[in-house]
Image (cartoon, grey):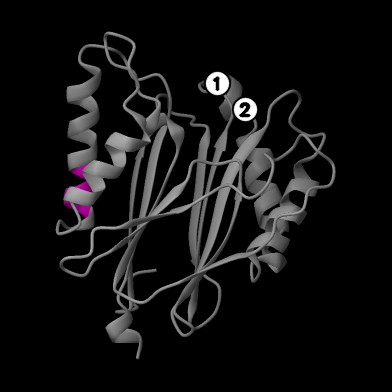
Amino acid sequence: PVDDPRIRFHVWYEPIMALGGDFYRIFPVDEHRYGIFLLDIAGHGLGAAMYMNTVANAFEDMRKYLGRAGRFMRHFNGALYGRLGDNFLTAFYGIINLKKKRIEYANAGHTRSLLFSLSIGKSRVRFLKPNGKVLGIFKKVEYPDVEVPLSDDSRLIAFTDGISETFNEVGELFSERRLVECCRQGRSLTQEALALQVEKDLKNFSGSLRQEDDRTMLQADIFLRSSR
């Protein structure tokens, strides 16, 4: 969605093959709500990518549940159960409600999404943590809806572990901590510039090592002053 002045999205996606194991969707739920969905198939390369059609079809079949994050995740898990072999998925689904000024989310064993205030002088980051098990392994799993209030213009960042679990030449992880610090320092940057900075930092950190996993970072800038 690009025609709503209250919100702006950006995607950085860098798979290691033509077929990737990361899956994302950004879409309007209704007039005042937008959904941001990010999923990561365990493993990488062809083994992960071969399940992508199953994932995409299950997502389309579950669209009628997209109005509630926890309910969607529960039905989505049920649709995937028994269809992924020994594989499993992690996923984050956040619903940004511009009218009620809040984010409702469910996190199925995925990396913690990051929520920053874009207001000058406010550098605190809020973590949108996992609140349910991974997808596709357990037949019935409940995912509570978690609500996070929004009081300032904000930037939501969801990412896959192909970013935080990048290694350098001495075996260290790039880590969530380094990503958080990069995003914190880049709050004044445009979404495009921040994505380029993250990419640059990853390349500087990993040196000559080859990329080992798909990388996806979704950004949503939320402008509350425009939604009044």
Q: Which mark is residue 50?
A: 2
Q: Left or right? Give the position of 149 relative to 152.
A: right
Residue 104 image position (x, y, % from top left): 55, 67
Residue 199 image position (x, y, % from top left): 23, 35
Specify the quadrant of the image occupied by residue 215: top left
Quarter of the picture holding the C terminus: bottom left
Whether 40 is drawn above or below 42: the answer is below
Whether 75 is drawn above or below 108: the answer is below
Q: Residue at x 80, y 39 (%)?
A: 81
Q: Residue at x 38, y 32 (%)?
A: 164
Q: Which secondary structure is most common in the magenta stretch?
A: helix
Q: Residue at x 20, y 15 (%)?
A: 207
Could you say which is closer to the camera, residue 184 or residue 169? Answer: 184
Could you say which is closer to the camera, residue 98 or residue 30? Answer: 98
Residue 186 image position (x, y, % from top left): 18, 51
Q: Amino acid at mark 2?
A: Met
Which stretch appears magenta?
Answer: 192-196
Quarter of the picture holding the N terminus: bottom left
Instruction: Report the residue that reaches farthest toward the top.
Output: 170
Q: Amino acid at mark 1?
A: Leu
Query: Mark 1 = which residue?
Result: 46
1 and 2 marks in contact (CB < 8 Å): yes
